[in-house]
Image (spheres, rainbow, N blue to C red):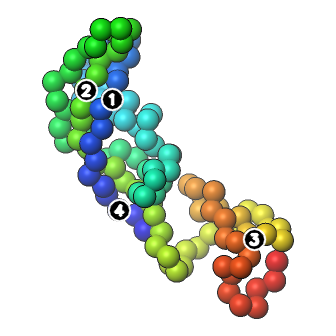
Amino acid sequence: MFYSVLAEDTIQVPCWMLGTEWSQVLLDVLHKKLSNKVLENEGLCLAVQQLLRADEPYIFPGSKGKVTCSVQFTMVMFRPVLDQVIIAVVHSTDASGIALSLGFFSDIFVPGDMLPEGSIL
């Protein structure tokens, strides 16, 4: 359900963030870009865990002063597997299915035809 993923990305750092510690700036940009986002074929990114590597930063002409840097990092992901039993709170129900909340994530929808036999909506 929860797991750590090794990832690489190229990020742009606005020039107004350049006065503080570089590794913290990179983590802040990664958090803003990835945390609480659903990534295709990965799941929900809960947090960027650790910055492992940052390549030499560079500035492209016409980038309005943004510093570009390639980074390698780990992030904590949430992805339940098929048929996994989870404890959730029913957010709403209608004829099409049930909307559930896990507290930190509330975009779970179970279609009515996927509910166990004998379930009544």
Circle 1 residue: 11
Q: Nearer the viewer, mark 4 or mark 2?
A: 2
The numbered mark at residue 106 is none
Q: Tag 1: Cα neighbours inside 10 Å, few (<14), some, or many (≥20)?
A: some
Instruction: Name the outermost residue toward the front.
Output: 61
Q: What's the distance in space between the residues labelled 3 and 4, CA to CA? A: 28 Å
Label 1: which secondary element: strand
Q: What's the distance in space between the residues labelled 3 and 2, CA to CA? A: 44 Å
Amino acid carrying mark 1 in the image: Ile
Circle 2 residue: 69
Q: Quadrant of the C terminus?
A: bottom right
Circle 4 residue: 3
Left or right, 102 with reference to 61: right
Left or right, 70 with reference to 79: left
Q: Tag 3: Cα neighbours inside 10 Å, few (<14), some, or many (≥20)?
A: some
Confirm or deny contact between disc 2 and disc 1 (CB under 8 A).
Answer: yes
Label 2: which secondary element: strand
Q: Quadrant of the N terminus?
A: bottom left
The numbered mark at residue 97 is 3
Amino acid carrying mark 3 in the image: Gly
Q: What's the distance in space between the residues labelled 4 and 2, CA to CA? A: 26 Å
Q: Residue 87 is drawn in which quadrant?
A: bottom right
Q: Is residue 120 above or below residue 92?
A: below
Q: Earlier in the sequence, mark 3 or mark 2?
A: 2
Q: Earlier in the sequence, mark 2 or mark 1?
A: 1
Label 3: which secondary element: strand
Confirm or deny contact between disc 3 and disc 2 (CB under 8 A).
Answer: no
